[in-house]
Image: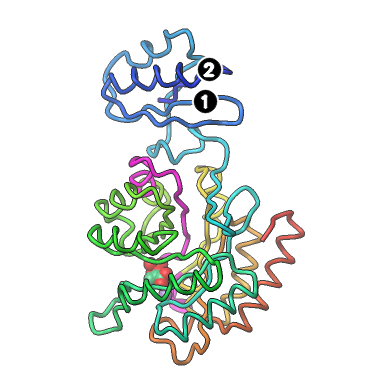
Amino acid sequence: MIVVMKKGASAEVVQDMVRRVEGMGLKAHVIQGTERTVIAAVGEKRNGERETLESYEDVEKVVPILAPYKIASREVKPDPTVVEIGSFKAGLGHIGVIAGPCSVESEDQIMSVAADVKKAGATALRGGAFKPRTSPYSFQGLKEEGLQLLAAAREATGLAVVTEVMTPGQVELVANYADVLQVGARNMQNYNLLQAVGETLKPVLLKRGPSATMEEFLLAAEYILDQGNKHVMLCERGVRTFETHTRFTLPLASVPYLQEKTHLPVIVDPSHGTGKASLVPPMCTAAVAAGCDGLMIEVHPNPHQAVSDGAQSLTPEAFQHTMQQCRKVAEVLGYTM
Ligand code: PEP
Ligand code: MN
């Protein structure tokens, strides 16, 4: 249910209502809108709660939330959520660009690519220190050493650091170094991990599972939001289909669809979405044209020597050109990047 408070309801009045909602055994999430405050009351419903809540003088109305996800839905929060960390900003017409290698490989590699992507206009640096690899024999990441190198690159460039966390047990360690916790596609339905990143209150980049429906994707985001973490970004990174000409199939209609259903920023990852460097630049401009709130792009100083995902990684030069093209599209549509 959404408890819509009357215009101008004071903080004390809202807090009183939160206590009443909690007294009914429901969780209360306060959402401050531009017009008025609403309280999302979520949990297992019993009888008569709606009528009881509606009977209070400071309550304008109580409406049911029709979507299966609650706090993630636009019904609860019509205003878009903006995720901002230093110079990185995603949402409400701001396109945040997260760029960097698939994996952190060495100090030279991460420092040089961080400087290059920063110069080209990226606002966050990506790089995996814990890598979810399909084969147990593939490079698994530099782990804590990789996190330290990312932190050094942040120190040198000022870029926010986005990096993946794979297990609940790693959350504390990764959160010590990262600005944004990435939950990878393979872990989208790892509910213990979703709850653990939700508890940190650090911004989270949640990647869509390769076979997840939009509803499953949004319900996964709901697990994070339900812990009180409001800073969740959704990342479309392509789904598994019968098609083999690309690594995954990148459905850009997800962008406007998700923006209709949720207030959360929508990021597009054309690198994993296509798997081929030559297809990445046009899909970046297409994602901007579709209205995305951010891009995640793999960039490597020497893609041929990358230990992971070299085939889909842009060179720094190609990334710079891609940024120029994206900016042109953004400008026409009135977005900033
Ligand atoms: C990645 O971002 O490097 C990654 C492993 O992506 P995904 O989880 O989307 O496969
Ligand atoms: Mn990768």
Q: Secondary structure at mark 1?
A: strand
x, y percentage for residue 275? 47, 77
- Which residue, given by chain and number where applicable, does mark 1 sit on? 37
Name the foreground residue: 332 vs 120.
120
**Residue 231: in magenta span:** yes
The secondary structure that dominates the magenta segment is: loop
**Residue at (75% x, 60% y) in the render:** 331
**Residue at (42% x, 65% y) in the render:** 239
Which span of residues is magenta-colored? 220-248
What's the distance in space between the residues labelled 2 and 1, CA to CA? 8 Å
- Which residue, given by chain and number where applicable, does mark 2 sit on? 9
x, y percentage for residue 197? 33, 52
**Residue at (41% x, 47% y) in the render:** 218
Position above or below: 198 against 65: below
At label 2, counting other C-alpha atoms closer than 10 Å, the crowd grade (few under 14, some 14-19, many 20 or more) is few
Q: Residue furthest right?
A: 332
Q: Quadrant of the N terminus?
A: top left
**Residue 242: in magenta span:** yes
x, y percentage for residue 301? 53, 86
Position above or below: 175 against 56: below
Say what amino acid the circle numbered 1 marks.
Answer: Thr
